[in-house]
Image (cartoon, rainbow, N blue to C red):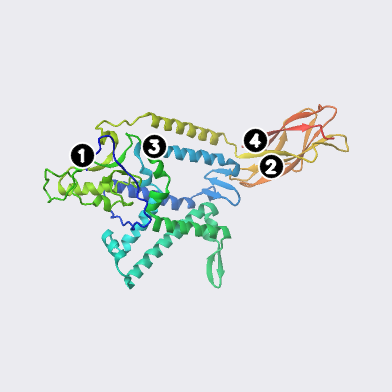
């Protein structure tokens, strides 16, 4: 098989639901060392973050039941979800930019599906053995030893799934509820969780167990949309894992230390296939199943070292370099486009966060009657001022009316104490002297200020003489 002259070949994915379970061989090497460090760094970060506290509270806590979301020193409410949208857009365009430059490195080095699948497969290796032993184990008849090992593997998987689910739910329910609330049922200690936590635990445990234990590469190949639209984002200068056809073909076995003239450098050892976590053969060309983990590169380089051939038969390269023998362009319009969008989004997010006042005020008028006249002949307008303390500390707030001739403010309380994240509806009335206030509507501004003067927010409305 010779390499096409125009481009790197692309092989269609096989949609076979009866495909046998893949048991990849674990390999070491330059890229795998980076990959393992990267994967388990993100895994450790995921497990540790819920335990970090800030100002006496869980630093990252998405408290959905109370609709308060804490990220270190910031408190967000449901109406602040546009920040989440901006975060999501930054993550998406960041991923797009990385994909254009270096292909699916996210999939191979940081994706949760890859991390958990690697961890579950490593459990199989520890209990059953390396690749050949696992393949023989699957084909072996049922026995007490096989049942025992399977039970041990499944039990460890279940424990990992429960740990994963507990950590996931901790970001929402909080670590205090998840780990410190217990009750005794018939002498057996059980977590004292509300129903929704039990439901979430079941869903996340089942999803983790199914995805990492059974779906594995099928999630990457047939379900994950990222693998589907990656080809649209690739160009001829995108770094991809590729097999050098010109150098490797025709393939064939040979004695160690020899290099027959009628054969290429590929010794047909199939190590590149054995180490692939999705079970593809990289020599067949670019495939949707390739997550660019570079395991085939490390395996092939190891074989090349043993047979005395140069490394790089399988390597990170670009279509320009491999097929057209041209130098790749690192800086190109598409990268600049994504970088420009990211710069605008990040700049807008930083500005919004720094300009954000952690205090919210909203004014609602009494819809039943626009205005009324009291016993003293003053025109009265009634309002409900909703105050929300978005800080992570308790503050006392005072409501004032920006001076307008003929208008005065009357509040039920001089100050309103609000705990962190608390909201309060404060009824207030504004009185107008009919001899001074003009007929129709008069603009008014109510200002809420913390007693320490640290926070202040204003909201406008109107005072009306209508409806009497």
Marks 4 and 3: in contact by CB < 8 Å?
no
**Mark nearer the N terminus (4 vs 1):** 1
Residue on which disc 2 sits: 386
Q: Is residue 140 left or right of residue 466?
A: left
How crowded pointer 1 is (Cα within 10 Å; few <14, some 14-19, many 20+) is rated as some
Q: Secondary structure at mark 4?
A: strand
Q: Nearer the viewer, mark 2 or mark 3?
A: 3
How crowded pointer 2 is (Cα within 10 Å; few <14, some 14-19, many 20+) is rated as some
Q: Secondary structure at mark 2?
A: strand
In the rendering, at what x and y percent does residue 447 appear?
69, 35
How crowded pointer 4 is (Cα within 10 Å; few <14, some 14-19, many 20+) is rated as some
In the rendering, at what x and y percent does residue 107 appear?
38, 46
Give the CA separation, mark 4 to mark 2: 12 Å
Q: Secondary structure at mark 3?
A: helix
Q: Which mark is residue 233?
A: 3
Give the CA separation, mark 3 to mark 4: 45 Å
In the rendering, at what x and y percent does residue 221 appear?
38, 49
| Residue 194 visible in the displayed image | no
Residue on which disc 1 sits: 246
**Mark nearer the N terminus (1 vs 3):** 3
| Residue 12 visible in the displayed image | yes
- Who is closer to the viewer here, 296 or 408? 296
Residue on which disc 4 sits: 457
Q: Classify 114 as above or below 356.
A: below
- Who is closer to the viewer here, 401 or 454? 401
Q: Secondary structure at mark 1?
A: helix
Marks 1 and 4: in contact by CB < 8 Å?
no
């Amino acid at each position: 098989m010779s390499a096409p002259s125009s481009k790197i070949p692309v092989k269609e994915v096989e949609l076979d639901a009866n495909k046998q379970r893949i048991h990849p061989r674990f390999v070491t090497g330059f890229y795998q060392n980076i990959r393992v460090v990267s994967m388990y760094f993100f895994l450790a970060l995921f497990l540790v973050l819920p335990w970090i506290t800030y100002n006496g509270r869980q630093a990252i806590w998405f408290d959905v039941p109370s609709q308060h979301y804490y990220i270190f020193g910031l408190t967000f409410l449901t109406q602040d979800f546009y920040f989440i949208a901006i975060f999501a857009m930054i993550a998406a365009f960041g991923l797009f930019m990385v994909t254009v430059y270096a292909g699916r490195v996210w999939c191979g080095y940081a994706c949760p599906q890859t991390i958990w699948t690697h961890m579950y497969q490593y459990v199989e290796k520890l209990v059953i053995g390396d690749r050949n032993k696992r393949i023989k184990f699957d084909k072996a008849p049922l026995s007490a030893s096989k049942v025992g090992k399977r039970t041990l593997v499944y039990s460890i998987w279940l424990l990992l799934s429960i740990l994963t689910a507990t950590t996931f739910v901790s970001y929402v329910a909080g670590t205090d509820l998840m780990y410190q609330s217990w009750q005794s049922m018939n002498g057996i200690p059980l977590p004292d969780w509300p129903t929704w936590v039990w439901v979430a635990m079941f869903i996340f445990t089942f999803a983790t167990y199914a995805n990492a234990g059974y779906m594995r590469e099928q999630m990457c190949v047939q379900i994950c949309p990222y693998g589907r639209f990656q080809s649209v984002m690739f160009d001829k200068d995108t770094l991809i894992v590729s097999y050098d056809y010109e150098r490797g073909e025709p393939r064939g076995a040979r004695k160690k230390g020899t290099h027959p003239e009628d054969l290429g450098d590929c010794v047909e050892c199939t190590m590149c296939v054995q180490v692939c976590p999705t079970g593809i053969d990289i020599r067949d060309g670019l495939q949707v199943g390739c997550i660019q983990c570079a395991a085939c590169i490390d395996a092939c380089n190891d074989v090349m070292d043993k047979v005395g051939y140069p490394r790089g038969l399988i390597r990170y390269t670009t279509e320009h370099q491999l097929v057209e023998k041209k130098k790749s362009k690192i800086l190109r319009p598409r990268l600049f486009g994504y970088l420009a969008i990211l710069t605008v989004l990040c700049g807008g997010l930083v500005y919004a966060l720094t300009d954000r006042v952690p205090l919210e005020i909203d004014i609602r008028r009494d819809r039943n009657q626009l205005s009324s006249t009291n016993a003293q002949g003053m025109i009265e307008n009634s309002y409900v001022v909703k105050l929300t303390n978005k800080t992570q500390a308790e503050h006392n707030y005072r409501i004032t009316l920006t001076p307008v001739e003929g208008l005065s403010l009357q509040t039920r309380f001089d100050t309103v104490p609000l705990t962190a994240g608390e909201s309060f509806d404060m009824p207030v009335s504004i009185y107008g002297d009919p001899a001074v206030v003009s007929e129709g509507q008069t603009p008014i501004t109510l200002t809420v200020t913390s007693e320490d003067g640290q926070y202040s927010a204003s909201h406008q409305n109107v005072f009306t003489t209508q409806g009497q």
